[in-house]
Image (cartoon, rainbow, N blue to C red):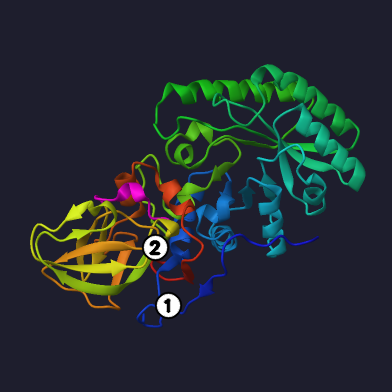
Amino acid sequence: MPCAPLTAPAVRVTDPARPPGRAAGPELRLDLAAVAANTRVLAARATRLMAVVKADGFGHGAVETARAALGAGASSLGVTSVEEALSLRCAGLRVPILSWLNPVEADFEAALRADVSVAVPGREHLAAVVRAASRTGRPATVHLHLDTGMARDGADPAQWPDLCRQAREAERGGLVRVTGVMGHLGCADTPGDACTDRALELFRTASAVAARAGLRPGIRHLAATSATLTDPRTRFDLSRVGAGLYGIDPTRTTGLRPALTLTAPVVSARTVPAGTRAGYGHAWTAARRTHLALLAVGYADGLPRAASGRAEVLLAGRRRPVVGRVSMDQVIVDCGDRPAVPGDIATVFGAGDAGEPTVRDWARWSGTIEHEIVTGLGTRLRRTVHHSGVAA
């Protein structure tokens, strides 16, 4: 099997006992102990847990977070594309993997050869998977995917009975094995929303239709992070959890731990008089004599420009405002009456233990969600992996 390259830059595993030095540039630290702790919380609420490591593990590193989650209670992995699944196989991961968002022209033959299960959202995809099975001589393991009310991926409920009949015919021909039925919830971030009730009714009906067609899928899965945390009705045989592994709880009901810390050294510092204008468009003017510090990190590294005028960092033990506009490669920090010196380390975001901003803060300042912040982190950040932070 040809190995597809991982999308993230290589990470360096660091010794947690080694004292931090003066950084050469911005550093993104991944705490695998946090991933493991979050996994245990979620696994305790799920019947079985699939660790979703799509989008390079939500920007955290797919292989590293997959291993941490599997070691803490997850039993399988989920990704969107076949290519993501093959990267995990090439890294030596041999647990069940499901890929659920592929074009009809995807390399299903490679998926079958690598023992990767694929989701089937319609007749066209089923036909493509059957052709791949015929060419490889390997039956495809598939999960039939139902649209439970989001008008996104998944089969329209009106087409579901026909999809189940055709899947059963392919099973009789020895070309597929339908092992799962899946859907997704559009309103689970708001516990008690009637949208979830309607989706549950659709999903239960679809499961019954599959059974009447002669299918016997042993894995029904509907819940992601939010529903797993707040709605036991949705857990069925498996929960597909992504965001929660990394410390993101959209329901804000559970104390999950953020797994990333972004730091950046002060590149230069200066003292400016009142009236000094800073940054593009002179969007900020000093109201008094103050000390400014420059950090070499910006929107090319994933700091949203929309956070300009609202964002803060932790520097010298205190929250300090980011002033002026976030630039591609740099931000200006107003240090007030405490001057910084080149080499001082600012914490852009972290777990919040020392009062530093969190990813949730950056999402709020930017008018977005935490998922967008972590998946948008730039590839030139120096990435390191740590096994400290919380008890593993």
Write the residue at 42% across / 71% down.
388
Quarter that holds the C terminus: bottom left
- As helix, strand or loop, the secondary structure at mark 1 comes to loop
* Amino acid on which disc 1 is placed: Pro
* Amino acid on which disc 2 is placed: Asp
Local packing at callout 2 (Cα closer than 10 Å; few below 14, some 14-19, many 20+) is: some
Q: Is residue 379 toward the left or the right of residue 330 in the image?
A: right
Percent across and percent down for residue 20 are 36, 80
Q: Which mark is residue 16?
A: 1
The residues bearing labels 1 and 2 have C-alpha atoms spaced at a distance of 29 Å
Local packing at callout 1 (Cα closer than 10 Å; few below 14, some 14-19, many 20+) is: few
Percent across and percent down for residue 160 are 70, 22
Range drawn in magenta? 302-310
Percent across and percent down for residue 211 are 73, 25
Q: Is residue 133 toward the left or the right of residue 69 in the image?
A: right
Say if 152 sits above or below 378 in the image.
above
